[in-house]
Image: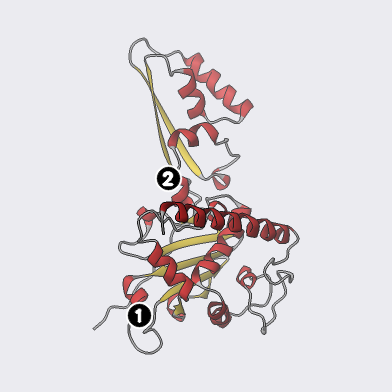
Amino acid sequence: MSDEEREQWQDRNEEEHRIQHIYFRQGYRQGKCYLCGKDFKTISKDEPCLHWLLRQGKFKSKDIKLIAAKFGYHQIAAYLRWCANEERLLANINDLQEEAPEGKILSSTIRWKAVEWSFDCSPNDLTGHGGSHSNFPHYHFQMRIEGRQFINFNDHHLPFNDVDLFAFELSKEQGMQMDFGAHGAGMQDAMNFDPQSIIDCTQVSGSEEESAFHISTMVFAQGEPMRGEDIAEAMEESRKSGRSMASILHERFKDSDVSVQTVISPSESVPDITPRTERKRR
């Protein structure tokens, strides 16, 4: 593909992503699945659907195999990410590379209400290993409800479909960016934002549980001592406007000899990535 063809392909993909999400959100707000048109509480064994994973109906743990036989990893993960971001943008999805176990192809945890889903795939899983139950490209899936076990990583070897494998191959090509789009973004995307944009655009949340970022700001006076009134005024402005202290302090002291340094990190309320303990070969 030429550069122009790649751009056109990407534009079409992004437009389809946007349209699909509009349909998804319309259904979500009514408590219905946009894929099958049924209520989230409805489970039809002859029509497996992704909304089963929300566990609003009587979905049994073994039924994950029915879902995985119909939908690929990328479809499943995208749907769960969309649901998670409806509850709390970005911070319900921990796909941070620095927190993932070393060498993993996939490692992420997604939270939605009282449910947590985790995905895991090692290089051995991607190539297929072991007996007939796992000698094909696959991933592992875990599901917790209110912290209790429901599906464990080692319960199943869920197959990647052809679209998944094609996406993995495309991700290796120069100029091809394979992700879950704007509506499926998680904390890795968030930490790749321009730091100044985060400082300028974020609003102060009511609590740590609601926030995506933890922002710490240090102020150093290079010459004359700082006035306590300046900090007090900045705090009052932050309280009234909802702007972060970091944004206000950077703005107030940008043309002075006062140094302002800000450290941005994921909020403490971002779910931890659930690690999988792999069985070692003899």
Residue 46 is drawn in which quadrant?
bottom right
Q: Position of residue 232 (x, y in %)?
A: 53, 19
Query: Which is more toward the observer, 182 or 2?
Result: 2
Relative to 92, residue 49 above or below? below
The numbered mark at residue 128 is 1
Mark 2 closeness class: few <14, some 14–19, many ≥20 residues within 10 Å: few
Q: At x 46% / y 80%, what residue is drawn?
A: 155
- Residue furthest out toward the left: 282
Q: How many marks?
A: 2
Q: Quadrant of residue 204?
A: top right
Which residue is located at x 33 percent, y 82 percent?
129
Q: Earlier in the sequence, mark 1 or mark 2?
A: 1
Image quadrant containing the N terminus:
bottom left
Rounded to the nearest whole Å, what is the CA distance between mark 1 and mark 2? 32 Å
- Mark 2 lies on residue: 192
Between residues 205 and 193, which one lies in front from this camera angle? Answer: 193
SS category of the residue bearing label 1: loop
Going by the numbered disc 1, the residue's amino acid type is: Gly
* Contact between labelled residues 2 and 1, with CB atoms less than 8 Å apart: no
Q: Tag 1: Cα neighbours inside 10 Å, few (<14), some, or many (≥20)?
A: some
Query: Hey, which residue is sitting farthest bottom in the picture?
Result: 132
